[in-house]
Image (cartoon, rainbow, N blue to C red):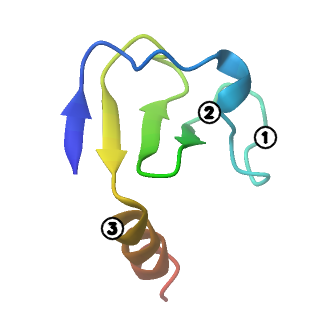
Amino acid sequence: MNVEEPVPNLPDSAWYKSSYSSGEGGQCIEVATSPSTVHVRDSKARTGPVLAFTPGDWTAFVGFAAQD
């Protein structure tokens, strides 16, 4: 994982939230993907730092987070 600053030059349309997000300004993250990187940012701080994962690392993280 890396932290990228400033935010990568990705259009707002490239970022998406989970379907579980309520849209009421809660604690959400947004994700944008490219072939070599998965970018993750705080939905409340869109111009702040962005985490960058390899696709394999992101898959491992999501799998771990989904465990009970």
Marker disc for residue 63: none
Within 10 angstroms of label 3, few (less than 14), some, or many (20 or more) residues?
A: some
* Residue where numbered disc 3 is placed: 57
Q: In which quadrant of the rendered view does residue 43 lie?
A: top right
In the picture, measured across the screen, residue 42 lies left or right of residue 48, that is right
Q: Are marks 1 and 2 in contact (CB under 8 Å)?
A: yes
Residue 19 drawn at (x, y percent): 79, 52
Specify the amino acid type for callout 3.
Asp
Of label 1 and label 3, which has the lower sequence position?
1
Residue 54 drawn at (x, y percent): 34, 58
- Element type at mark 1: loop
* Residue where numbered disc 1 is placed: 22
* Residue where numbered disc 2 is placed: 26
Front position in the image: 7 or 66: 7
Of label 3 and label 2, which has the lower sequence position?
2
Residue 62 drawn at (x, y percent): 48, 70
The residue depicted at 30 percent of the width and 12 percent of the height is 6
